[in-house]
Amino acid sequence: MNFCDLAIVLKNAQLRENDRIVTIYTRFHGKLDIVFKSVRVSKGKLKALSELFVWGDYRLFLKKEGAIPICTGGEILSVFPSVRADIKKMFLVYYFCEIISRLTPLNQPNEEKYDLMLSALRNLDAHKEVSVWMRPAFALRFMELAGSGFQETAVGIDSRIWKVLHKGTWREVNSLERNDLAMNYIDELIRKFMGEHLNYKLKTEEFL
């Protein structure tokens, strides 16, 4: 069976000598593990499509009784060059990718999660400065989409901050003034959530 989908690369790993197994989050099929054949050789044509946080239109083939699709082609839509040129932005995207990869089951479509990741990447790519609120805003929104968020919970911080972090545009998130007390409170909520669902600390936290 051949099919196509828009997707963002979350992680990749070596498979055998020249292949890669790549985790992507697709618009219509959710999180998928897919195989890229011969992309580790010097003339590997699809190597660019298998790189981290590439956004592309992927052509995939799944054998009748196969478990993992094979990438047969596609088109890169963006590599988010501003993100790749800024180490702080890159670590933030690694954090986003780890959250989605660790907390999302395979083959469970959720277009809102796809839209969240894509909009976050576009926001980071479009702005020189990274808002300190973007990390908690992404995590809180993902937690809501995962069905275990705190949006309706009464918390001891400014209600406007809480509302913007959950429902505001990225421009509104970027315009929030720094508030260390509120941020520390929210970070603790997020850590507790991740600890309960993962039983260990996210690897990317130490770089943020």
Image (cartoon, rainbow, N blue to C red):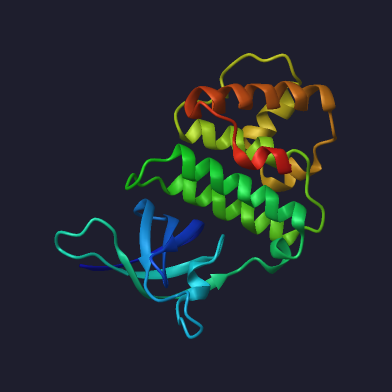
Q: Is residue 113 visible?
A: yes
Which residue is situated farthest in the front direction here?
Answer: 17
Which residue occupies 36% across, 61% down?
34
Q: Position of residue 19 (x, y in %)?
A: 40, 69
Q: Quadrant of the N terminus?
A: bottom left
Examine the rendered structure and indicate whether residue 51 appears above or below residue 40: above
Which residue occupies 45% across, 62% down?
14
Q: Position of residue 97 (x, y in %)?
A: 55, 48
Q: Quadrant of the C terminus?
A: top right
Taking depth in this image into account, of 112 and 79 the one nearest to the observer is 79
Q: Position of residue 95 (x, y in %)?
A: 62, 45
In the image, is 133 to the left or to the right of 37?
right
Taking depth in this image into account, of 125 and 199 the one nearest to the observer is 199
Which residue occupies 80% across, 37% down?
176
Examine the rendered structure and indicate whether residue 98 appears above or below residue 185: below
Residue 126, quarter of the rendered image: bottom right
In the image, is 57 to the left or to the right of 156?
left
